[in-house]
Structure formats: structure tokens, C-alpha cells
Image: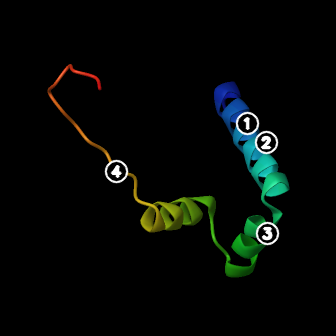
Amino acid sequence: MKRGTRDRNRELDEQMQQFERQNPEIAEAMKVFGMSMKSYVMAVQATNPTKSTTSDSTTVG
């Protein structure tokens, strides 16, 4: 495994551990239901879709 890949994997693992510490109830539910982080993110996005607006105007107001 390349060094860059190891570093990214380590960083991702640290972020997951931090998420689990900060959100123990969600982390436990994910384990109970066998959800991956990808599945969790997709579920959150489905229940809280973001709205994006585009414009060709340069006026801010």
C-alpha cells in the first residue's frame, strides 16, 4: 500500500472514531442496522435535501 493511501486511510479512520465519540447513539444505530457511513450519508441527504440556486446575476442582496 502506498504511503499516501495509508495516510488517507488513517485520517478516515480517525474521522470515523471522532464521529462515533461525538454521536454515540447514531454510531450504535448504524452498528445495529449494519449501516455503512455511505448508507448513513445517503439517508441523511434523502431526508434533508439541500437546495441549490443558480443565477447569472452578479447582484447580491
Lower sequence index among marks 4 and 3? 3
Q: CA distance from mark 3 to mark 1?
A: 22 Å
Q: Which residue is mark 2?
A: 14
Instruction: Find disc 4 in the rendering and name its residue.
Output: 51
Residues tagged 2 and 1 counted as in contact (Cβ below 8 A): yes
> What is the spatial separation of the Cα atoms under label 2 and label 3, in whole angstroms?
18 Å
Q: Is residue 2 above or below residue 29?
A: above
Q: Looking at the image, which is closer to me, 20 or 48?
A: 48
- The furthest residue to the left: 56
Which circle's residue, 3 or 1, is located before the other in the chain?
A: 1
3, 28: nearer the viewer: 28
Mark 3 neighbour density, 10 Å: few (under 14) some (14–19) many (20 or more)? few
Is disc 2 surrounded by few (<14), some (14 to 19) or many (20+) residues within 10 Å? few
Q: Secondary structure at mark 2?
A: helix
Query: Residue 28 versus residue 36: which sits nearer the camera?
Result: 28
Q: CA distance from mark 2 to mark 1?
A: 5 Å
The residue singled out by tag 3 in the image is 25
